[in-house]
Image (cartoon, grey):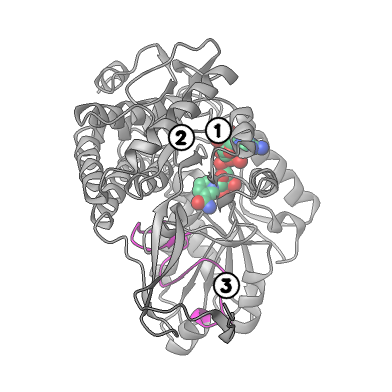
Amino acid sequence: MSNIDFLKVLGLEDLNQGVSTGNDWMMTSDEIESMSPVDGRRIGTVRVAGLDDYERVIKTAEKAFLEWRQVPAPKRGDIIRQMADAFRKYKQELGTLISYEMGKSLQEGLGEVQEVIDVCDFASGLSRQIYGLTMHSERPDHRMYEQYHPLGIVGVITAFNFPAAVWSWNTMLALVCGDVAVWKPSHKVLMTATACQKIAAHVLKENNIPEGVCSLVCGANDIGEIMAKDKRIPLISATGSTAMGRKVAVAVGERLGKTLLELGGNNAIIITENADLNIALHASVFGAIGTAGQRCTTTRRLIIHSSIFEDFKIKLINAYKQVKIGDPLLEGVHMGPLIDQAAVQNYLHALEECKVQGAQFIVEGGVLEGVGYESGCYVKPCIIEVQPDFAIVQKETFAPLLYVMQYDTLAEAIAIQNGVSQGLSSGLISLNIRETEFFLSHAGSDCGIANVNIGTSGAEIGGAFGGEKDSGGGRESGSDSWKVYMRRQTNTINYGTGLPLAQGIKFDF
Ligand code: NAD
């Protein structure tokens, strides 16, 4: 399929409006170009929000909330079910756009759209399961229970690397909960955001849903900053770097709003002497080079038992020789480009730092040049032997750099794994139940995600997704993450004839 075909099917033009309250697209003045890291070409241009446009979006969303919260939850769920069908219809084209605009392999692009569909299905079912608890009151003839009400506007700020999935994780849940959503996507992937909004808006229009239930405000970081300070947005769900999360936490915290933060990771796999090395190899390579090392759950560190360290290094070197780097839209390509030149500079800077700190390159890095690599965004994945306490190893470099290090006891391996400021995803490869259970115990991994005989990347939507420490502490997607999008209310009802007061207090009147 040519570029023109998939853009046309998605309703995208050369110049697109990027601010929408649903089906209504606003005429705004500023523009951002979307460049493909795959071939360096301009995909299109998206018009972005100024302050006035933002105001209109928020005012419309405020109004829409008053109507949307009246719609019964299962009816809201039915609309999300229709969204799932709409995304099924456009899976191929949207997956292709994601791959072309972000640079991940087509398989991963399609997989990302599947995540959108899956979370819509999940949210649709959830719409009949927004349960509260009941409890026995200590007072006679009293009944107590808890119920959940929608919050209002949910501000969704997303990163470039999952340009569709993270929006859907938040928006679909928010919508079934009775909230309305305002999305500020990364300015690096605005064509994907515009396409997602068009697909969703069509479903909303067909169901006569008021403008403002599901809005898009394309823009740069400044729009995110305005949202974080905006008291009319009770919950900001922000996905991105830890540096961004710290700023958002302060701005939202200052106005006592709620945050759901999904931030950077520094994920490790521990490979014990009891590991199935075939599983270990597949988990490590997929985790390190998938999405060119630009997943929050990318495997950045391998902590390998000293008895198998040298042998496993050889396996890794051989596996890396098989990695095909190139146009991610082509079949058989494992790794596409980094998102842009700035990402390439970060990668090169990290390689320099590794050298300065005395790390040893097992597989050399570098920028690829020549036919097929004209965008200048293709880099070699590399493997670097380090000491766990090297400064560079503490940082998340959003690129395919894999640090390897060795350990002697499992307690030592877990201390290394937990000894960084981030706490998103972790994995242990072992066939020994004592090792696996220790890793999963309270003394084991301190991450939000702890896997056994699976790597660090690729989470299913059914579980709550998120990390601890500098990874933000938020939980989104499956399980009971929906509770974050609602306010909880405790209700006590007296159906008796008297009014027993707390702590036995009595009045004489
Ligand atoms: P980024 O922090 O540069 O930007 C993320 C989003 O935040 C963008 O929409 C950006 O415009 C906005 N933003 C930036 N500064 C802001 C501010 N001060 N106030 C409000 N909004 C602001 O991140 P990125 O480069 O797009 O994405 C890569 C990072 O995202 C990595 O650190 C990665 O680990 C992280 N990430 C985390 C998860 C997760 O679920 N934990 C998922 C995907 C990506």
Q: Amino acid at mark 2?
A: Val
Q: Is residue 58 magenta?
A: no
Q: Residue at x 70, y 66 (%)?
A: 388
Counting labels gives 3
Residue 297: x and y in percent read 50, 55
Residue 39: x and y in percent read 45, 23
**Which residue is identified by label 1?**
368
Residue 343: x and y in percent read 61, 35
Q: Indicate left or right for 211 with 401 as reference.
A: left
Quadrant in the picture for the N terminus: top left
- Give the magenta range: 439-465
Which mark is in front, 3 or 1? 3
Label 1 CB sits under 8 Å from any ligand 1 atom: no
Residue 140: x and y in percent read 39, 85
Give the alpha-carbon distance from disc 3 to disc 1, as whole Å: 29 Å
**Which residue is identified by label 3?**
304
Marks 3/1 in contact by CB < 8 Å: the verdict is no
Q: Is residue 459 magenta?
A: yes
Which mark is in front, 2 or 3? 2
Q: Residue at x 26, y 43 (%)?
A: 80
**Which residue is identified by label 2?**
182
Sooner in the amino-acid sequence: mark 2 or mark 1: 2
Image height of 68 relative to 472, above or below: above
Sooner in the amino-acid sequence: mark 3 or mark 1: 3
Q: Amino acid at mark 1?
A: Leu
Secondary structure beneath disc 1? loop
Residue 400 visible (yes or no): no
Q: Residues within 10 Å of mark 2 (few under 14, many from 20)?
A: many
Image height of 140 relative to 25, above or below: below
